[in-house]
Image: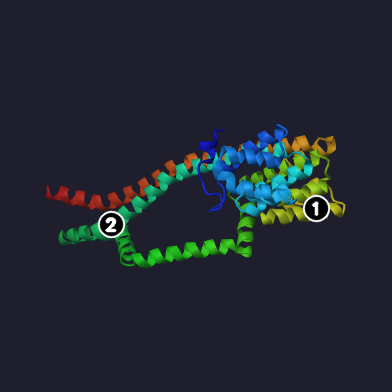
Amino acid sequence: MNSKSAAGHFDTHARPLTSIQVAWFSYRLASALKAGISPAEALEMICAEDPSFAGVSGEVVCDLDKGLRIHEAISKTGIFPSYFVNMVKIGEATGTLDRVMESLAQYYEREDYLNKEIKSALTYPLVLICLVAAVMLVVTWQILPIFEDILISLGVEMPTVARLLMLAGCFVGENLLQFVVAIVVIVIAVWTYSLTDVGKMRIEKWKAHTGMFDHLFQKAYAAKVGSSMSYAVGSGMSVDSALEMAAETVGNDHVAEKIEWCRAQIEQGKDLAEAMRLTQVFPDEFIHAMQIGLKTGDLPHVTMKISEIYEDEVSRTLEGMISAVEPTLVAVLSVIIGIVLITVMIPLTRIMASMG
């Protein structure tokens, strides 16, 4: 990966790093660690390769010299994702930091690719929706009343559908400012609520249990849990300690609570698979794989494999959903425009035919 194209020139203290910036950082650090270079020296090398990282890398090196661990030092900067920080913590605790960094690089590179695909796929439909909404407003608010006057002068009533659309358009047009203000207030209120502890927990609970996308979210969470447990158990940690670390990396407070509840059930004598099944936040295939891994003594390999499978499935599913968004929206909007045109033009064609 080219450092300039990947990382670019950015102010690392201004805002959190993007996915591609984290991927670039991870690749460079992983390569240096595999070569036997210390983390402090590796960070100095990253500074030399990209001066825009000099500030944050220098800060991390300074904290390392003070005795802080790597995950503590990078956490202090406030620009790295929490998942990245927690996975680095696992890498330090298990002595597999180089492998973890390589895995994180691949993870964030995939995330960057998906983010770009989502942005690309949604930009055109969103612009199209705004344009069609504007056209619909002009047609129903300004043009349909003119057609109504023409039809009335010819002794013909406007079709019910067209009249309802006209009334709705006139209402929106006459109260446009109020509608815009209301939408902005609602968006701000929802965004503010999502930042509160209660709001965040409700949203995360919804993501884990919503009927439409629950399997997708559950596979994404299972992939994170399986990956972190693979590194932890593979380095000799107990399943209980591995679950504790997995709770920190999952990225969902509701799921993290369920994992902690799972640990408590295991301490009371329940089987791991049974306890995980009772949480109702993990796919059955994942639980079955965990069970096989425990029975065969190959839990690290099994959990890593199922995590890779789930990551691929989530990526493919998202790509499929993204590719379906644009044609679906175009079809829906075309139908709406067609209905408006038909309801207005049919009476006119009949009048013109009778006059001919």
**Looking at the image, which is closer to me, 22 or 187?**
22
Q: Is mark 2 on a helix, strand or loop?
A: helix
What residue occupies the far left of the structure in this picture? 356
- Taking the image as shown, residue 95 lies to the left or right of residue 157, namely right
Q: In this view, does 236 lie above or below 342?
A: above
Horizontally, residue 268 falls left or right of residue 356, namely right
Q: How is the image coloured?
A: rainbow
Q: Image quarter for residue 91?
A: top right
Q: Nearer the viewer, residue 211 or 306?
A: 306
In x, y percent, where is residue 167?
Answer: 31, 63
Q: How packed is label 1: few (under 14 Cα within 10 Å), some, or many (20 or more)?
A: many
* Residue linked to disc 1: 263
Q: Position of residue 93 (x, y in %)?
A: 78, 45
Whether residue 281 is visible? no
User: On residue 138, which mark appears?
Assistant: 2
Q: Along the line of sight, which residue is nearer the eye, 292 or 24?
A: 24
What's the mark number on residue 251?
none
The 10 Å Cα crowd at callout 2, few under 14, some 14 to 19, many 20 or more, is: some
Q: Which amino acid does label 2 sit on?
A: Val
Q: Residue at x 45, y 42 (%)?
A: 120
Percent position of residue 190, x then y: 52, 62
**Are discs 2 and 1 less than 8 Å apart at CB?**
no
Q: Residue at x 26, y 53 (%)?
A: 344
- Depth check, front residue: 342 or 332: 332
Q: Which of marks 2 and 1 is in front?
A: 1
For this orientation, the residue located farthest to the top is: 35
Asked if 130 appears above or below 197 in the picture, the reply is: above
* Amino acid type for the residue under numbered disc 1: Arg
